[in-house]
Image: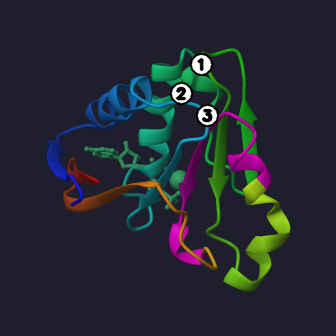
Amino acid sequence: MTESETQTTRSEAETGAVGRDVAKTLGSGSVVLLSGDLGVGKTAFVRGMAEGLGIDPADVSSPTFTLVQEYRGGRLPLYHVDLYRLKSIEVPDLGLDEITLAGGVTAIEWPDRLPRPFAGAITVRIEHVDASTRTISIE
Ligand SMILES: Nc1ncnc2c1ncn2[C@@H]1O[C@H](COP(=O)(O)OP(=O)(O)OP(=O)(O)O)[C@@H](O)[C@H]1O
Ligand SMILES: [Mg+2]
């Protein structure tokens, strides 16, 4: 049975706080898949995850052309992956298996581009309600 919970946030900071609280519970090798439309708040959630790991959240940007960014200096390294521009056929070349086995926490935006699911990954789905409201379901 999978556990699932849904929360509503009313600002970018509130979404970050959800990511921060999730990150505090994560151990080495955790993978978080972040689904949701363009501009819904996936990167905002990852910024909160950085904070929860003790990394400066201001370091986390939207990696437009960088596919994988690594942030250190926290309890665990954070790998931030954005697959938006990729086709699933290109993803195996990224070395995602090595990254997720490297002992950090991996957050992946646009996981629908993955050629196969990640066993044991945490799925975070963010949905747009209105300009400042989102629902976040985590399972
Ligand atoms: N409740 C909310 N939670 C998160 N972001 C919100 C919320 N309300 C408004 N926003 C705004 O939505 C935008 C979210 O941007 P963000 O870059 O995090 O989205 P994204 O899902 O990573 O987009 P992309 O698909 O382009 O990577 C920001 O401009 C933020 O201020
Ligand atoms: Mg993003």
Determine crowd level at label 1: few under 14, some 14-19, many 20+ residues with C-alpha closer than 10 A.
Answer: many
Q: Is residue 118 above or below residue 101?
A: below
Is residue 123 in the magenta section? no
Do tag 2 and tag 1 residues touch (Cβ < 8 Å)? yes
The total of numbered circles placed on residues is: 3
**CA separation in Å, label 3 and label 2:** 8 Å
Read off the residue under disc 2.
50
SS at circle 2: helix
In the rendered image, the quadrant that contains the N terminus is bottom left
Read off the residue under disc 3.
60
SS at circle 3: loop
Identity, as a three-letter code, of the amino acid under mark 2: Ala
Do tag 3 and tag 2 residues touch (Cβ < 8 Å)? yes
Identity, as a three-letter code, of the amino acid under mark 1: Ile
Asked whether residue 81 is in view, the answer is yes
Taking depth in this image into account, of 135 and 96 the one nearest to the observer is: 96
Whichever of callouts 1 and 3 sits on the residue coming sooner in the sequence is: 1
**CA separation in Å, label 1 and label 3:** 9 Å
Identity, as a three-letter code, of the amino acid under mark 3: Val
- Nearer the viewer's eye, disc 3 or disc 2? 2
The residue range painted magenta reads 98-113
